[in-house]
Image: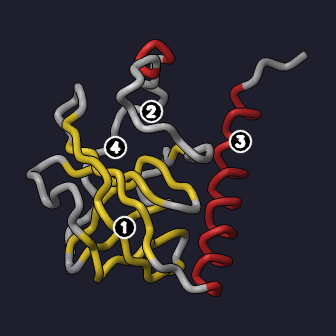
């Protein structure tokens, strides 16, 4: 299997980029993923890096080629988080190439059973806490 490709630049979000009404409105805070190996996603036999995650979906990236198209359902998909593997189904909601040449996919999860939903919530809460801890580490001391 392939290793995840290079990481997208961290914290490259400019609030001015979010004034466009044509961009999707988020239902929840998407937890940025800064550790390339903390969260990866396997679709079929190929691994993808993840740049963010929320209970309802995941942001994937790939540097080599367009792998999926909008509306495509992803059946054989696993989220790999800190050694745990969570099987999920998803649908590609959007595809774009960013300023760094990476192809980014927004994938919404489909038809999660209750056990998977509970585990996904736990995974996202853990990722959220790890992200917030990094912010605390970067905060100036008072």
- 1 vs 4, front mark: 1
Is 135 placed left or right of 69 in the picture?
Answer: right
Residue at the (23%, 25%) spot, across then down = 99
Residue 37 position within the rendered picture, expressed as x and y whole percent measured from the top left: 43, 59
Helix, strand or loop at label 3? It is helix
Q: Which mark is residue 7?
A: 4
Badge 1 density bin: few <14, some 14–19, many ≥20, Cα 10 Å: many
Residue at the (27%, 73%) spot, across then down = 74
What is the spatial separation of the Cα atoms under label 2 and label 1, in whole angstroms?
A: 18 Å
Residue at the (10%, 50%) spot, across then down = 64
What is the spatial separation of the Cα atoms under label 1 and label 3, in whole angstroms?
A: 22 Å
What is the spatial separation of the Cα atoms under label 1 and label 4, in whole angstroms?
A: 14 Å
The residue to which callout 1 is attached is 41
Is 19 placed left or right of 103 in the picture?
Answer: right
Mark positioned earlier in the residue sequence (1 or 4) = 4
Badge 4 density bin: few <14, some 14–19, many ≥20, Cα 10 Å: some
Q: Is the C-beta separation of discs 4 and 2 under 8 Å?
A: yes
Among all residues in the image, which is located at the extreme left?
A: 65
Residue 115 position within the rendered picture, expressed as x and y whole percent measured from the top left: 63, 87
The quadrant in which the N terminus is found is bottom left
Q: Relative to 49, does residue 142 appear above or below in the rendering?
A: above
**Number of marks in the rendered image:** 4
The residue to which callout 3 is attached is 132
Is 116 placed left or right of 57 in the picture?
Answer: right
């Amino acid at each position: 299997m392939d290793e995840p490709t290079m990481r997208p630049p961290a914290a490259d979000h400019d609030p001015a980029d979010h004034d466009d009404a044509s961009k999707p409105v988020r239902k929840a805070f998407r937890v940025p993923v800064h550790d390339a190996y903390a969260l990866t996603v396997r679709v079929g036999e190929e691994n993808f890096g993840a740049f963010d995650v929320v209970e309802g979906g995941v942001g994937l990236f790939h540097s080599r080629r367009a792998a999926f198209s909008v509306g495509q359902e992803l059946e054989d998909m696993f989220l790999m988080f800190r050694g745990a593997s969570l099987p999920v189904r998803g649908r590609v909601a959007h595809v774009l190439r960013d300023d760094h040449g990476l192809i980014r996919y927004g994938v919404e999860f489909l038809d999660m059973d209750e056990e998977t939903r509970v585990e996904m919530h736990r995974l996202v809460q853990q990722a959220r806490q790890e992200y917030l801890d990094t912010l605390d580490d970067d905060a100036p001391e008072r």
